Image (cartoon, helix red, strand yellow):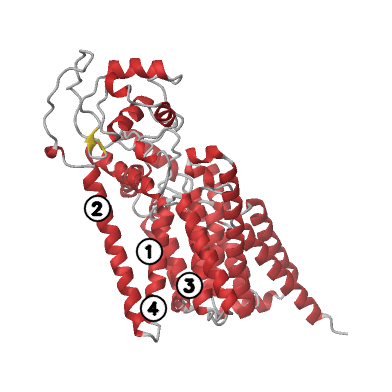
Amino acid sequence: MNLAPNRDAIHQTLYMLALALLVCSLPLSKFLLSLSQFLLLLNWLAEGRFREKAVRLRQNPTALIFASIIVLYVAGMLYTTHAGTGWIRVKNALPLMVIPIVIGTSAPLTGKNFRMLLLLFSAAVTIATLVCLINYLADSASDADFRKISLFMLHIRFSLLIVMAVLILLYAAFYGDPKPREKIIFLITALFLSAFLVLLRSFTGIVLFVVTVSIFVVVTALHSQKPAFRYGLPTLVAIFTLALVTFTVREYHRNFPAQALLPAETDSLTAGGNRYDRNVALNTFENGQSINRYLCEPELKKEWNRASAIPYDSADKRGQIISYTLRRYLTSKGLRKDSAAFSVLTAEDIRAIENGTTNYLFKHSGLHQRLYETLWEIHVWRNTGFVENHTFGQRIVFVHSACRVIRKNLLIGTGTGDVYDSMLQVTRDNRIPVQKAWEGKPHNQFAFVLIAFGLIGFVWFIVALLFPAYHTKSHRVLLFNLFMMLVFLSMLVLDTLESYDSIVFFAFFYSLFAFGRERLSF
């Protein structure tokens, strides 16, 4: 009696179960994410058939080329001065080797199983989103910091998973030949995830969503047989993009005008007879009004300490200097910064300022507030160079610091474990006031690779990412291209491959598309 077919079937079933556990764990649990990879590797070793697997690798060596990214991390250990940090980076990068080799040498997935894994991932993201939403609605304090809405991972990384799930659902609805009921479910779920992304207010995630979904709409419309869709939808996308850009530019100039437009101050004394401070540079604005005009610090301090238990010289509940929060809040209402203006504030206003609300329009947070905050950070950086605690401004500073480190170590970089310390040293040497808790992350994956492995390693990295996709013809699949665009754009503002869950996310989906199937039609 031949037991080989049964044995093969068992291992194939275990392979699918491990992959299913992996995709379900991506948005929910790092522990299960690690367990799924352990089971995946254990089943691969127990299955044996290494000669057949070696033949598969010889026939399609691109899985090895992609997995060779791990060699960069190991080679960078030869000249790093921080071995402990470097080995942590190597350990986190192991999925870049394990996942493509296991998937690339295993039996190709059927179209049904391939589709099931993608939809399982979307379902897991939806469940994670529902849990976060229920927790947010149950906890009234969640509104104080939108970053706390995401329970399972950093909100910006969760937004990447949400965008990918939306793209999968849209692709399944329009390219997967679904039944009418399935199509409705896919579209409603995609709409729900899109709405949650707005609630999450990850500016990076929203930009990635707009870019990738717009491209999906345009490409899908161009394949339509109906002229109204083929020409109408791309036109609508173009109009929407133009309107979005116009609105953003208009908001910036309306809220942050040039100083030359400011009228001259007419009063030198407050109603209480105290002098306004005229030695403060008029260079920052709120709702089109200068924050530092008509400012009497002694009166503000006296009135605030009378009204609030939080001292004037301390921090609000978001860690911002409360005196500056108060000045911004008063300015946003078009008020002067003195005792007469302070008397207009209500108890609700005081609570809002204590909670870190800098603009009276944003007592109830929303997407417009997130856009405004980003524009305000740009405005402050342009006018003062101040970036501390400002997400956008600090990323610009990080890129400048990264360029300085790269120039000093152009060919082979600093080594795997020296990136963060090199960034911190350059920032200290140039006396750049960034967030005190900053660890030295460049917040840019391309910058990280250039710093760690130099120009030689960077070329290797890019080839390892692009060549397998070209060789396996994965670049002909719309969903894969959208995934790659999502990842590449995220790499401009995130150390995408330096976070364990993001590494697994990237390694799995790349391997699934490039090495997991013979035919890539969905």
Circle nearer the viewer, 4 or 1: 4
Q: Nearer the viewer, residue 121 or 325?
A: 325
Residue at (68%, 74%) from the top-left corner? 50
Describe the element under mark 3 as helix, strand or loop.
helix
Q: Which residue is mark 2?
A: 249
Which kind of residue does numbered mark 2 sit on?
Val
Q: Can you give x and y, in whole percent of width and height, for residue 175 in the image?
A: 50, 79
Q: Nearer the viewer, residue 307 or 445?
A: 307
The reply to whether discs 1 and 3 touch (Cβ–Cβ < 8 Å) is no
In the image, what residue occupies the spot 79% across and 76% down?
7
Q: Which residue is mark 3?
A: 479
Q: Which residue is mark 4?
A: 221
Q: Amino acid at mark 4?
A: Ala
* Residue picked out by circle 1: 211
CA distance separating discs 4 and 1: 15 Å
Tell whether label 4 touches label 3 (CB within 8 Å): no
Count of numbered badges drawn on the protein? 4
Label 2: state its secondary structure. Answer: helix
Q: What residue type is disc 3 on?
A: Leu
Report, in whole angstroms, how far the alpha carbon at label 2 lies from the one at label 3: 32 Å
Distance, label 3 to label 4, CA atoms, is 15 Å
Q: Position of residue 461 (x, y in %)?
A: 43, 62
In front: mark 3 or mark 4?
4
Q: Please tell me how crowded label 4 is: few (under 14), some (14-19), or many (20+) other residues with Cα within 10 Å.
A: some
